[in-house]
Amino acid sequence: MKSPTQFIVKPFNDKRYVNEKEIGGVNFITNTSEENHKASTRYGVVVAVPLNYTGEIKKGDILLVHHNVFKFYNDMYGRRKSGKSYFMDNLFFIDEDQFFLYNQEGVWHTYDRYCFVKPIKTKESTIIKNTRYEPLIGLMKYPNEYLKSKGINEGDLVAFKPDGEYEFEVDGETLYRMYDHQITLKLNGNKTTQTEDNTSRI
């Protein structure tokens, strides 16, 4: 069974929500709202790739997906519904713009124009910054091929445009998913390097 254009996936461990935490050998429910996107599973296991697909992703790989893929919602009558990605029997159709990383043999790889930045904790300064993380600065965690071609590699300190901090938790780390054109500078000591002509990638 294959789709002409979409990946078919199932939620990791067949669970559409990650809302339990074990404390002292007892499982506690951490979230009871099925409409809270932060509790929905972000990992999908590839069951089938599209027909005539020739890319790197294979059956069994894990995709980091959009928060709405597996989430339930309530319609205007309060009835529990699945989103548009639902197919049947805990299987879901995934378009290429609904996932951002894929894990193959334990290694995460970027997909298309997406990259991931790790925020850094707010540094002490004479200016009071009422933020958990430094604004608009972070460490490049997963650069895509375009950024690598511009000299941006894993571990580089980078600056990015505002309002692009789409937050994920990947392997226990908080990361921001971004498009490559949102990365504006590579910060290297006292030197800065402009990564691109922004008009060419928007």
Image (cartoon, rainbow, N blue to C red):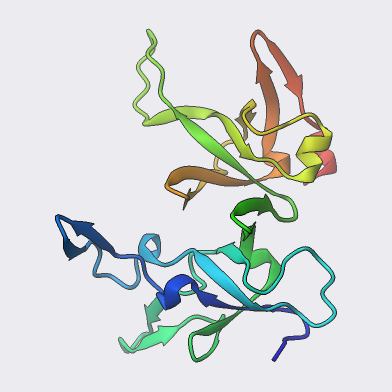
Image quarter (top left, top right, bottom left or bottom right) of the N terminus: bottom right
- Residue 6: horizontal and vertical position, in percent? 71, 78
Question: Residue 82: horizontal and vertical position, in percent?
Answer: 45, 83
Q: Residue at x 68, y 35 (%)?
A: 183
Q: 81 and 120: which one is in front? A: 120
Q: Residue at x 73, y 41 (%)?
A: 181
Picture layout, residue 117 above or below residue 189: below
Q: Is residue 154 visible?
A: yes
When the figure is inspected, residue 23 is found, relative to residue 175, above or below; the finding is below
Q: Give percent across and percent down for residue 124.
A: 37, 14
For residue 149, side relative to residue 61 (left or right):
right
Q: Quadrant of residue 101?
A: bottom right
Quarter location, residue 192: top right
Residue 149 falls in which quadrant of the image? top right
Tell which of 60 and 121 is nearer to you.
Answer: 60
The number of discs equals 0
Question: Does residue 93 appear to the left or right of 82 in the view shown?
Answer: right
| Residue 71 in view in this figure | no
- The residue at 75%/20% (across/down) is 193
Q: Is residue 188 above or below residue 4?
A: above
Q: Is residue 73 left or right of residue 22?
A: right
